[in-house]
Amino acid sequence: MCYISVRRLLGYWLWLSPSVASAAYAPLREYAGSNFFDGWDYYGFHDNTTWGNVTYVDRQTAMSSRLTYVNGAGNAVVKVDNTSFIQNGPLVYRNSVRITSQEVYGIGSLIIIDVRHIPYGCSVWPAFWTLGSGKTWPQGGEIDIIESINLLPNNQIALHTTPGCFQSQNLGQTGQTTEGDCSTPQGCVVRETKANSYESGFAQAGGGVWATQIDASGIFIWFWSRPDVPENIKTSNNASSIDTVPWGIPTASYPADGCNISQYFTPQNLILLTTLCGNWAGVPGIYDSTCHTPTMSCAVDNVVGPGSPTYDQAYWEISWIRTYTLALPGQPTTITSSDPPVQDASSMTVSRGATTSTTQATSAALTPGPTVSSAVSSTLPTTSCVFGSVLLVAMLGNLMLR
Ligand SMILES: *[C@@H]1O[C@H](CO)[C@@H](O)[C@H](O)[C@H]1NC(C)=O
Ligand SMILES: *[C@@H]1O[C@H](CO)[C@@H](O)[C@H](O)[C@H]1NC(C)=O
Ligand SMILES: *[C@@H]1O[C@H](CO)[C@@H](O)[C@H](O)[C@H]1NC(C)=O
Ligand SMILES: *[C@@H]1O[C@H](CO)[C@@H](O)[C@H](O)[C@H]1NC(C)=O
Ligand SMILES: *[C@@H]1O[C@H](CO)[C@@H](O)[C@H](O)[C@H]1NC(C)=O
């Protein structure tokens, strides 16, 4: 009871003090450096989901043949085998890697990946994506964060779900929508329009960063090429909280008014892979739209043979992946709708997703408007009336002094 009233008072205080930042997300886990490959499972089987010409090796093979390792710069490298000679035949498999995080990330999560190099080249099909746990695809939902093929210049973002999930018209996004129905085979696709999101241009710009917000209010994905990475990400480390408010409009927005996120998305595993050819990169008509090789067969002209120089650019180089959560462990996540509407003027100018997410994931029952940050609420003691009263007196004193 006392907690609610302290919250209300805090709300008024925030309303009167628009300079209070909403530091929304607390760090959960970092995959980086010598610990990058902890907490992942290696697939250990050939590509039986997109029918590429690869075997995704097990951990021991990946480590011993250096398809996964940490390089001198401390970055994780995940690559396609470019040292083995592969013969032609009825079945053609070159070694590659598919890893799946052991942890899952549900509504209220933020996932940020800092990448230096993404695999590219004819036949190459890399993806960093998430897949709903505990269900048969696509019943748990799928979020494709980084995905492109061959020599295409741009990244493509997509969601995959069962029927009934659409990208709403009520959008703030910089990317270009090419399909709005998430249950179609290609999913609801948003093509990146910013420069240097894939291929050689991405690497030459120094790579870039993607942030994916999975929230009750929607799914929102931002991309920044290296020179445009926001200050609060550039200056963060693995212990920093992260606020989405300064990021502006996302590349791709999937607001909940077109897709009930909690209905279509179970907690998500992270997946990183590179396949070759298969049912996107290798499809005749798609393959030869950017690749003009001798026989125009994706596998024969690329996978078959020595592997180098064909796959010299077919590697991921990743500085880190960090995951965050709205709620701090052991802290309250429910706010009653009796809290006053608190509006931070600075946050009203940014996109819908960025503004409303903190509150909606904190409590789906919350009326629109409040922007009380979870970090502020989380750090507030839930039970101490004495503390609340002291805080109140201090705040009022502070206000009167202005
Ligand atoms: C953060 O990074 C430091 C090294 O920079 C490492 O020792 C520590 O384990 C990391 N913490 C997490 C949560 O990954
Ligand atoms: C792919 O193969 C693995 C290993 O045999 C199996 O567990 C999995 O169910 C298969 N996946 C599909 C989609 O067939
Ligand atoms: C790989 O490449 C060959 C072409 O040599 C193709 O016929 C085959 O269907 C492809 N897929 C697999 C899984 O081997
Ligand atoms: C969204 O889905 C959840 C879980 O299936 C359900 O409880 C909720 O009522 C749905 N919300 C709306 C607005 O349909
Ligand atoms: C294979 O690719 C790596 C970069 O991923 C490159 O350094 C190497 O020279 C390539 N060729 C061979 C034969 O290893």
Image (spheres, grey):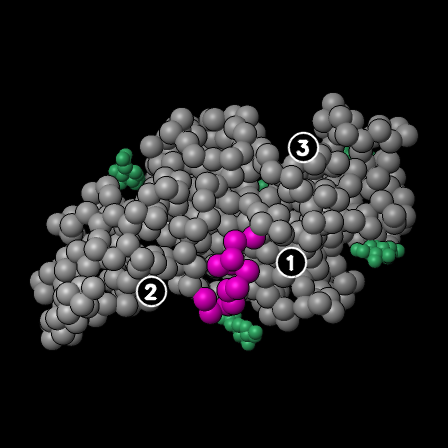
Q: Which quadrant: the N terminus?
A: bottom left
In primary-sequence order, the first of circles 2 and 1 is 1
Residue 271 shows in this picture: no
Specify the segment rendered in magenta. Answer: 229-240
Which amino acid lies under the numbered mark 3 shown in the image of this protein? Trp
Residue with the mark numbered 1? 318
Which amino acid lies under the numbered mark 2 shown in the image of this protein? Leu
Residue at 80% x, 31% y: name it.
291
Q: Compared with residue 110, is residue 254 higher up or lower down, i.e. above or below?
A: above
Residue 20: say if magenta.
Answer: no
From the viewer's perspective, tell me whether residue 302 is left or right of residue 231. right
Residue with the mark numbered 2? 328
Cα distance in 3D space between marks 2 and 1: 27 Å
- Where is residue 240, by image quadrant? bottom left
Q: Badge 2: how crowded within 10 Å, few (<14), some, or many (20+)?
A: some
Q: Which quadrant: the C terminus?
A: bottom left
Residue 272 at x, y percent in the picture: 61, 51
